[in-house]
């Protein structure tokens, strides 16, 4: 029996066209740059802590925002960061609603991950807006203080101990997944590596592997502290990014481990700029230019 050939690709829905639009692509690249700024600043602050030159700032989002606010034209820099974080949140929200443009982007796990990141960056964006409106350099509440307060509230809910424990376990799992994917260089599937020179590709791969692995380790460490909070029923065990990084200095490896993790976060910030430059995106053609059934290189076919 002769096999039936596939017909031309289905027309894109209105939502899919919006998600694949040039505006969303620009938002993704601007958002990745904003992410890069935050991680570079957090990495620098954490390195200073590891070297013993603690400036009094938290090695987390609040410290990064406070550092920006202290620079010349600090308020303008904060509003630029707000735009970048808002763009990041909207881009991730579009991915959650319509799927990512890369291969396998329609998987529920990827959509759920995008939704979580959209909420995460929206919360950070709101915090930066508050700082920009006040005009101060505090950068908002430290992550450690916020983590302990919210954890204590949830523990008081019916079944709160289970909720906190599950959240900690999920965060550990996310950290492990990030670590493994980074070591396996899975991130390269989302990049236009064919446009890179061999030396550039090696540098980007190094930044992605080391930076991503560091993020995974830090996320797993924070998740472990939250899980222990549920087991011991002690909100003081919950740690934000700053306290998680500082806890590395209390290990047998001492400050060296803290500095290594801090450098890793800084490298992830640099990788974010590379991803903004080379991340794959949908082709932007007019209907007359788009061949029937064609899908641009690196994009996923047949999006619903």
Image (cartoon, helix red, strand yellow):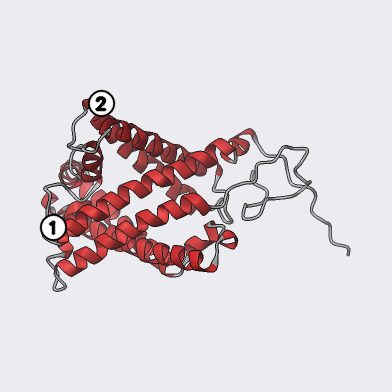
Looking at the image, which residue is at 12% across and 56% down?
53
Which residue matches tag 2? 133
Pick the front one: 70 or 20: 70
Q: Nearer the viewer, residue 224 or 276?
A: 276
| Quarter of the image where the N terminus is located | bottom right
Which residue is disc 1 drawn over?
232
- The image shows residue 232 at horizontal and vertical percentages of 13, 57
Residue 277, compared with residue 256, is above or below; it is above
Q: Which x, y percent locates residue 8?
A: 78, 47
Residue at the image position 26 percent from the left and 30 percent from the top: 132
Task: Kindly indicate the quadrant of the structure image that contains residue 271.
Answer: bottom left
Q: Residue 46's image quarter?
A: bottom left
**The residue tagged with tag 1: helix, strand or loop?**
helix
Element on which disc 2 rests: helix
Dot 1: few (<14), some (14–19), or many (≥20) neighbours within 10 Å?
few
Q: Earlier in the sequence, mark 2 or mark 1?
A: 2
36, above or below 221, in the image: above
Residue 263 coordinates in the image, percent (x, y): 28, 62
Give the residue displayed 24% in from the left and 32% down from the top.
131
Q: CA distance from mark 2 to mark 1?
A: 39 Å
Left or right of 55, for residue 206: right
Look at the image and tell me in which quarter the C terminus lies: top right
The outermost residue toward the front is 72
For residue 190, say whether it is visible: yes
Q: Quadrant of residue 253?
A: bottom left
């Amino acid at each position: 029996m002769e096999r039936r050939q596939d017909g031309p690709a289905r027309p894109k829905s209105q939502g899919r066209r919006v998600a694949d639009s040039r505006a969303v692509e620009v938002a993704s690249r601007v958002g990745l740059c904003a992410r890069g700024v935050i991680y570079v600043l957090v990495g620098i602050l954490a390195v200073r802590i590891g070297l013993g030159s603690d400036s009094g700032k938290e090695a987390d989002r609040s410290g990064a925002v406070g550092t920006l606010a202290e620079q010349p034209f600090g308020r303008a820099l904060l509003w630029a960061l707000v735009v970048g974080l808002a763009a990041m949140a909207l881009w991730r929200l579009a991915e959650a609603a319509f799927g990512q443009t890369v291969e396998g982007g329609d998987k529920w796990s990827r959509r759920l991950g995008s939704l979580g990141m959209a909420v995460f960056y929206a919360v950070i964006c709101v915090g930066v807006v508050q700082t920009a409106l006040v005009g101060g350099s505090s950068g908002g509440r430290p992550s450690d203080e916020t983590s302990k307060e919210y954890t204590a509230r949830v523990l008081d809910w019916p079944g709160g101990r289970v909720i906190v424990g599950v959240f900690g376990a999920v965060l550990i799992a996310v950290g492990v997944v990030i670590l493994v994917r980074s070591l396996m260089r899975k991130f390269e599937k989302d990049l236009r590596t064919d446009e890179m020179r061999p030396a550039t590709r090696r540098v980007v791969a190094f930044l992605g592997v080391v930076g991503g692995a560091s993020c995974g380790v830090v996320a797993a460490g924070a998740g472990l502290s939250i899980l222990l909070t549920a087991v011991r029923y002690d909100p003081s065990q919950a740690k934000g990014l700053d306290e998680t990084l500082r806890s590395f200095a209390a290990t047998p490896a001492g400050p060296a481990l803290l500095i290594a993790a801090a450098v890793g976060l800084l490298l992830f910030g640099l990788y974010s700029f590379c991803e903004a430059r080379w991340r794959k995106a949908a082709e932007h053609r007019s209907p007359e230019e788009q061949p029937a059934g064609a899908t641009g290189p690196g994009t996923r076919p047949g999006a619903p």
